[in-house]
Image (cartoon, helix red, strand yellow):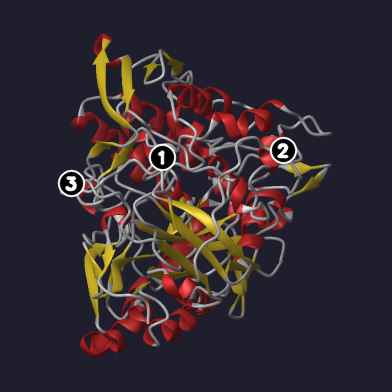
Amino acid sequence: MVKGLWTWGRGGWPAVGRGFLAIAIALAVTLGGCAQWIKPPPEAAIPSLVTSVLSDPKTFNAALNEESPNIFTYTYEGLTTINGETAEVEPALAESWTVEDGGLRVIFTLREGLRWSDGEPLTARDVDFTYNQIYFNDAIVTSTRDVMRIGQGQRLPTVRALDDRRVEFRLPEPFAPFFQTTGAEILPEHALRQAVETKDADGQPLFLSTWGVDTDPRQIVFNGPYVLERYSTSERVVFRRNPYYWRTAASGGEPLPKIDRFIWQIVESQDTALLKFRSRELDLMGVSPDYFTLLKREEERGEFTIYEAGPALSTSWIAFNLNQGTRDGKPLIDPKKSAWFNNVKFRQAVSYAINRQGMIDTIYRGLGEPQISPISVQSPFYVGEEAGVKTYPLDRDRAKQLLQEAGFQYRGSDLVDGDGNPVRFTLLTNAGAKIREAMGSQIMQDLAAIGIKVDFQPIAFNTLLEKLDGTFDWDCILLGLTGGTEPNNGANVWLVDGRLHAFNQAPPPNKPPLEGRVIADWEQRISDLYVEGAKELDPVKRKEIYAETQRLTQEYLPFIYLVNPLSMSAVRDRIQGLRYSALGGPLWNIHELELTEQDT
């Protein structure tokens, strides 16, 4: 996946140096070139790095993924990669590239001797196949296509294998973030071509149901530092070192990665993850503010270090469902609620009513700051209040004034609309994310102070994603997105037909269509600005384009941003080679890490 592309953040372990801003249907598909299977030695004999995630993975198909964390960070690479410390583009599967025709022709040269995890050669044909048959295939829904569209015509590059090691990209016009997009995972032609070319009974490519979470890991072919060894639902995901991974140590040529096995334990809550970390069952965990003081006291005795790297590369927000479409003649949203949600003064009033500083002081223990932008503060394209970006400090009187200007009235202390309907809606978030659950409870109380009743419901993460991506059956959500420093990697969020345009989502091709979806003028303007920003090569002009997007998002509030926490992780001292950063997290250079002792 394109590193830094925005993805749904589960609110648990932070993303590790990747992410875009999938549904897999289980069908039995026999694929050629299955991975070689070697009986592993007993687990106790294998040095392992162990961490945790809050919920089960949703797919093992990299092209269909839209969540973070995900297995693909560790199991696939693209032509390029992003350095987790410097944010600079670096070679990955490609050892070099040349740029011609004023930047419109780029030829990548692959490293010599690349192999897939089943031992098959990895060649330029795989790159050609991945882009032309998967990412650029309209029948396959993928966020990667969103961030590679160029210009007002939203055209895609043309990609062509020149020989076994060289592949050519031709761009229709200048495209500033091109080399960031070529971090997209390269997938194996020999294992997936049949699934792409074969249709199911509904005329959809079998690829859409290939490599789901019920797939035998031995059928899945990888090119990254690790391969899947085993997945036990609601228990663990086990990764094993890929014996065909291309990297070697700078000194001595030792094959990488150095750690043989990497394990995700699937836990139901962050409290459970804390208990497991304190009992030494886990080697790493993201440190939420409510755990910081406790863990800080235990650093020396617990033989771990807490790393802190400034504001996290993530957003937290609530969003109202602005989709005015219908499906089979039935509105997606109760029309009276839709009228509330689509009134910008209603959304502004809600934003003024939320006590962000209270969240920072109590929920975040002072380890955060108010968030006002979809663009990460580490990005050179971030701007703040000094550039005219609107902010919403707590002001309940202003909130009530805006509501009354919008036609709402008070019946005693309760808010009603112009027809006398009580203003009440449901707020959803993913269960198990302790910070989000606390934020949701506070939002419920904050909005009660201006007469709005909120029914707060934490639900399973995958159930929540199905509502966002399939049924569109929701009023308001509390979630987050994880990404990077390149604004165009949020194109999948801000293009009007982007895959994570959650507040007014278009249905993917494999879902029932909508009628009457409405695109607001401001919404279209933000989408157009993202197109303009991607083709502008002058950094100063690019910054002003993205500054305007930030002004618009804060004026019209498709996402009501909340708090940006500090990026913090606790890591066992036995893990050596760590280069922690907010951009990459603790594991962005996992191939270089090593353990100083065996598991105990």
Residue at screen point 47% across, 40% down: 494
**Residue 492 pos. (x, y %):** 48, 40
Amino acid type of the residue tagged 2 in the rendering: Asn
Disc 2 crowd rating (10 Å Cα; few below 14, some 14-19, many 20+) is some
Q: Is residue 583 visible?
A: yes
In the image, which disc is placed on residue 250?
3
What residue does disc 1 label? 2
Residue 188: x percent and y percent? 53, 33
For residue 509, above or below residue 478: above
Q: Position of residue 399 (x, y in %)?
A: 45, 66
Q: Is residue 311 above or below residue 381?
A: below
In the figure, is residue 196 to the left or right of 491? right
From the top left corner, tell me how far across and down residue 92 is, in percent: 31, 37
Check if mark 3's residue and mark 2's residue have beta carbons within 8 Å. no
Which callout, 3 or 2, points at the residue further toward the start of the chain? 3
Q: Which of the marked residues, 1 or 2, is nearer the chain's N terminus?
A: 1
Amino acid type of disc 3?
Answer: Ala
Between tags 3 and 1, which lies in front? 3
The quadrant of the picture occupied by the N terminus is top left
| Residue behind mark 2 | 510
For mark 3, give the secondary structure: loop
CA separation in Å, label 1 and label 2: 23 Å
Residue drawn 59% across the image and 26% down it: 137
The residue lying toward the viewer, choosing from 284 and 496, is: 284
Is the residue under label 2 in contact with that under label 1 (CB below 8 Å)? Answer: no
- The picture quadrant where one finds residue 362 is bottom left
Circle nearer the viewer, 1 or 2: 1
> Residue 59, can we see it?
no
The three-letter code of the residue at mark 1 reads Val
Q: Quadrant of the C terminus?
A: bottom left
